[in-house]
Image (tube, rainbow, N blue to C red):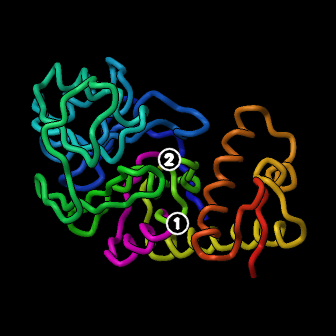
Amino acid sequence: MFISEIEPPRGEPLRITDRILRLVAPNPGPMTYHGTNTYIVGTTVIDPGPADDAHIDAIIAAAGGRVDRILLTHAHEDHVAGVAPLVERTGAMVAAGAVCPNGRYALETLLFDGDVVDGLTVVETPGHSRDHLCFVLGDVAFTGDHVLGWAPTSVLAPEGCAARYHDSLARLADLRCRTFLPGHGPQVRGTRRFLDALMVQMAERERSLWTLIADRPAATPELVERSYSNLGPQTRSIAERTVEAVLLRLEQLGRVVREDDKWRSLQ
């Protein structure tokens, strides 16, 4: 289902449309794929990515030397660390869906669902994070980490919420955008089929966990042990938070309950 892509150009802008350029930041990794995608739409920058001098230089050059505004899909470090140096270099204003962390940069504009800023419509899509936004320009949606171009989005409790993530996927489907430009990985075409596949995958994961609990009530760490093998400490922590997020959605749906730290099926 997920799209693979040859290593994208490093430090060189890729023209997506006549209005949209993409730069891939030099922060590849298991959670970021080739790196964070930074998009330039005129004098507006979406997600500056890491605080890398060469990447900041490339952003300013791709924007023709002028950046008036920075839009943030969410406040995770791989998307926002470059905000402060980009603001320092350009004087750009910052707009996002939540108060930015650590006071490292000023947030001039707090964005809400339906707002229009620099021609882009704001769509609130919580789930991966509480503050997550997508931005829509015509039939293109900048999806941040809500929909990725290479792997399923991580939804990690307690910050991530699988129930809200599922609802946000349905919300994005209703917009009928033809192209998704994600925060990591290549652009996504066939967007409705892609979203349907994500929701089917979520449903299958929910069924699998519910079946384990119906067979024998268990705490979250035990369910991870029964679902995965050969996990290192960091991977285990991510797996536990992922499973916990799914179980909290099942609890909201009335299918499971937690008693004495163990999950038990209700249906």
Q: Answer few, some or many: residues within 10 Å of disc 1's Cα (few below 14, many 20 plus, some between 14 and 19).
A: many
Q: Which residues are magenta?
A: 165-184
Residue extending farthest bottom: 267
Q: Is residue 53 visible?
A: yes
- Decide whether residue 79 is among the magenta residues: no
- Which circle marks residue 11 in the picture? none
Which structural element holds mark 2? loop
- Decide whether residue 176 is among the magenta residues: yes
The picture quadrant where one finds residue 169 is bottom left
In the image, what residue occupies the spot 76% across and 66% down?
A: 209
Q: Which residue is mark 2?
A: 159
Q: Is residue 9 visible?
A: no
Residue 97, x across and y down, in percent: 27, 49
Could you tell me how far apart the alpha carbons at marks 1 and 2 are, in whole angstroms?
12 Å
Residue 140, x across and y down, in percent: 29, 63
Residue extending farthest front: 260
- Residue nearest the viewer, comparing 149 with 215: 215
In the image, what residue occupies the spot 16% across and 20% down?
A: 89
Residue 170 left/right relative to 237:
left
Residue 68 left/right relative to 62:
left
Give the number of callouts.
2
The picture quadrant where one finds residue 197 is bottom right
- Residue nearest the viewer, comparing 244 with 48: 244
Vertical side of 181 occupied by 65: above or below: above
Q: Which residue is mark 1?
A: 163
Q: Answer few, some or many: residues within 10 Å of disc 2's Cα (few below 14, many 20 plus, some between 14 and 19).
A: some
Mark 1: amino acid: Ala
Residue 162 left/right relative to 8:
right
Vertical side of 222 occupied by 23: above or below: above
Mark 2: amino acid: Glu
